[in-house]
Amino acid sequence: MMVRSAHLRRHFGPHARRDSMKRWIVPTALPAALLLALLVDRGQAQEQEERFVEIDTLNVRDTLYHLGEGGANGLALIDEINGGVILVGTKLPGWGQPVIDAVYQVTDLPVTTIINTHSDRDHTGANSEFPDVTEIIAHENTAANMARMDLFAGSAAGLPNTTFTDRFGLLEDLDRVELYYFGPAHSDGDIVVVFPQKRTAYLGELFPDKAAPVIDTANGGSGIAFPETLAKVVEAIDGVDRVITAHAPIPTTYAGRGRRDRGERRAWTGWLTWDDLREYADFNRDFLTAVRASHEAGRSVDEAAANLDLPERYADYGMEQARANVEAIYAELEGR
């Protein structure tokens, strides 16, 4: 099932946008300052109106949902036994209500628990926008990183109140959630969220997409440690079939009403798998090997980025971050 939630449209009704558009037909003789204010207000209203979250069931018989839009992929687990919803990531600031509205399409239970996989604002930005939340969970390094962010300056609202060092568990049986920390990568606090009975794992920025990752050196990220950390993840965790990344698009088909695709395009094919994660760990290892070779050969950052010697199987990987990562790795190799 896929539900698209647009909280402003639902609140104001289907004719609200048409009426508001009529109001913006203004005489050209209006003072420039007033006209500018109207245009800014209009732009802000349209920006708000476009905030909606897509909620997709990962299995029509299950209570784990994917949350799209708003900056990064997220998850929502309905905890019917304890009467609440657990969120993995809260998206950008201002996206709390669209998430609440999306979750409301599948349950009346409030969001009570948040899991932050790292500190980036597209995963933590709406932390303080859920009035019923009593627990925010993160690795201790992520909690420290978040405490330094301007987003949370002067207020504990939205900051983690439960932290851990290596492992942490929630719930039992079918809804069991396990959190793992294996070392620095994107930052020094990235965790893996595993739903063992659902054979699903959320990797966050440890596996953002099939692309060169962002290395957040300001928050302890390490291009040298990244491949080693991913190798530890692959080695330590068993029984996962489906991998949810921070930014990779979800499948184009879904389990719900309407036409059902068959064969290779049947509902819910297309998710990334543990084999994809294994390949991603190899990619980061091979990337580091290539950068080390360039550094030892005395090449500049630009030369190294332009002459990355990578296997053909990574030909479709996004490389927008490649130069930045070469620079970060050079700095680490040189102790800067």
Image (cartoon, helix red, strand yellow):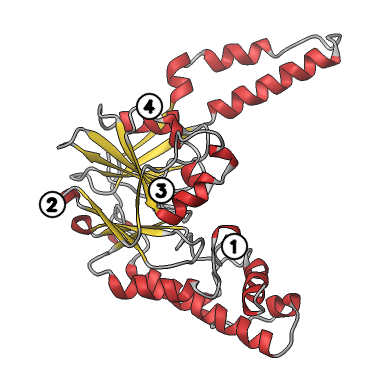
Q: Which mark is residue 131?
A: 4
Q: Are dots 4 and 3 in contact, CB under 8 Å? A: no
**Callout 4 secondary element:** loop
In primary-sequence order, the first of circles 1 and 4 is 4
Q: Which residue is mark 1?
A: 217
Task: Please tell me whether mark 3 sits on a helix, a strand or a loop.
Answer: loop
Task: Give the label, 1 or 2, closer to the camera.
Answer: 1
**34 in relation to 204, above or below:** above
Residue 153 is situated, as x and y percent measured from the top left of the image, at 56, 37
User: How far, Cα to Cα, is label 2 from label 3?
Assistant: 22 Å
Q: Quadrant of residue 139?
A: bottom left
**Who is closer to the viewer here, 165 or 49?**
165
Q: Earlier in the sequence, mark 3 or mark 1?
A: 3
Residue hosting label 2? 173
Label tally: 4
**Which circle's residue, 2 or 4, is located before the other in the chain?**
4
Q: Amino acid at mark 4?
A: Pro
Where residue 99 sits, quadrant-wise, is top left
The amino acid at mark 1 is: Thr
Q: Earlier in the sequence, mark 4 or mark 3?
A: 3
Q: Residues within 10 Å of mark 4 (few under 14, many from 20)?
A: few
| Residue 26, above or below 154 | above
How far apart are labels 3 and 1 at the CA level?
Answer: 19 Å
Residue behind mark 3: 116
The answer to whether residue 13 of the structure is visible from this angle is no
Residue type of the residue flagged with mark 3: Asn
Q: Position of residue 334 (x, y in %)?
A: 67, 79
Residue type, label 2: Asp
Q: Earlier in the sequence, mark 2 or mark 3?
A: 3
Q: Residues within 10 Å of mark 1 (few under 14, many from 20)?
A: some
- Camera-side residue: 153 or 285? 153
